[in-house]
Amino acid sequence: MKDSLRNGSLRNGSLRNGSLWNGSLWLAWRQQRVLVGAGAALLAAAAAIAVYSRSGMLDALHSGLFDHCGTGPLYCTRPDTGLPVLLDTDPLKYLGMSNIALPVLIGVFWGAPLLGRDRELGTHRMVLAQGISRGQWFASRIALAAATTVAVSGLLAGVLAWWWRPAADRSYGLFWYDNTALSGSGPRVVAAALFGLAAGTLLGLLARRVLAAMGLTLLVTGATTLLLEWSHRTRLLVSPHTYVSAGSVPKPPMGEKWSTGHYGLITASGRHDDVLNCPFPSGAELRECMAQHGYVARFYEANPVGDYWTFQWTDTAVLGGLALLLTAVTVLLLRRRI
């Protein structure tokens, strides 16, 4: 690091002779080019796997094996054996899991050392001594890291969406509410990646050692990721819809809705009771039980397929807001810590 400063920017005079900002960007590139290359390699590998696997998926769909399958969560079975027929979506799910883990990886391996490495080694003093301000030193590093993060995460989310589309919301494919699809695609992937970068950068500035910052970043980003997954399952941030049907006829199929698992019965006064009070399918027994207990309808709670975007934009707002807040705190602390 010190040699690169002496033999590069300082020797060429780029930090001294009227090109301070360009010199700072050049130094940021020198320090981060391996990580930029790793991100490009990851993206290229994901795209190659997606092209290959999606081609096989389309071949299977065009074979006619799935022509009799309808939409909905119920398994589609082979007419001759009764066994379920499924597409091989495991590689697609692996990409989704990688996208979910992206903020943790970016935060630990990019964000934490971004300022922390220079601070630990003391090499930032050599840069600041050449006339570079703290703001320029920080901005050049965060600009390159953030631009690469947005590009890589956005393209990875796009690759997953393109790969997923032929099998989206089908019994033989992958439903929108599967965590690898819901959290591994869309704009929330970009916001989550930026949050990981911001969290790692702040902790790298605060911690005395880069390894300590990496450990703290792992805990913070991992806990935030798990907390958001929990909020999806509990519908903490996106409330489910209540669907009502008469007990005298079969209820409409749920289709692509994401059920909360909360079913029940409704009295004339509007009270909601547990479905086990009348645990019968539609028919005479159910009608008799409902009449005996004064129930007038059934209900269940679920999120419709349109709520995919509600989840996406809610997560994006939360994670993007956290990323902006953590970045602002980092800027405010620069003078005290550097």
Image (tube, rainbow, N blue to C red):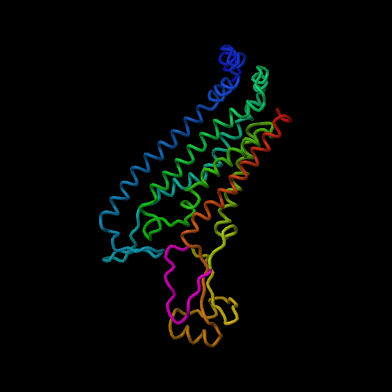
Quadrant location of the N terminus in the rendered image:
top right
Residue found at x 65% / y 34%:
204
Residue 269 placement (x, y as % from top left): 60, 81
Q: Position of residue 145 (x, y in %)?
A: 55, 32
Figure label count: 0
Which span of residues is magenta-colored?
242-257
Report x, y in % for residue 100.
51, 46
In terms of image quadrants, where is residue 47?
A: top left
Judge whether residue 254 is colored magenta.
yes
Lateral position of residue 157 relative to residue 237, left or right: left
Drawn side of residue 50 relative to residue 128, left or right: left
Front one among 133 and 78: 133
In the rendering, at what x and y percent does residue 85 appear?
A: 33, 60
Residue for point 52% across, 72% down = 263
Q: Quadrant of residue 239?
A: bottom right
Q: Nearer the viewer, residue 335 or 174?
A: 335
What is the chief secondary structure element of the magenta stretch? Answer: loop
Q: Eyeballing the image, is 238 above or below 266? A: above
Q: Which residue occupies the extreme front position in the image?
A: 18
Q: Quadrant of the C terminus?
A: top right
Q: Residue at x 45, y 42 (%)?
A: 156
Q: Is residue 149 above or below residue 67?
A: above
> Does residue 338 lie above or below 165 as drawn?
above
Residue projecting furthest to the right: 336
Q: Is residue 250 magenta?
A: yes
Whether 44 is drawn above or below 247: the answer is: above
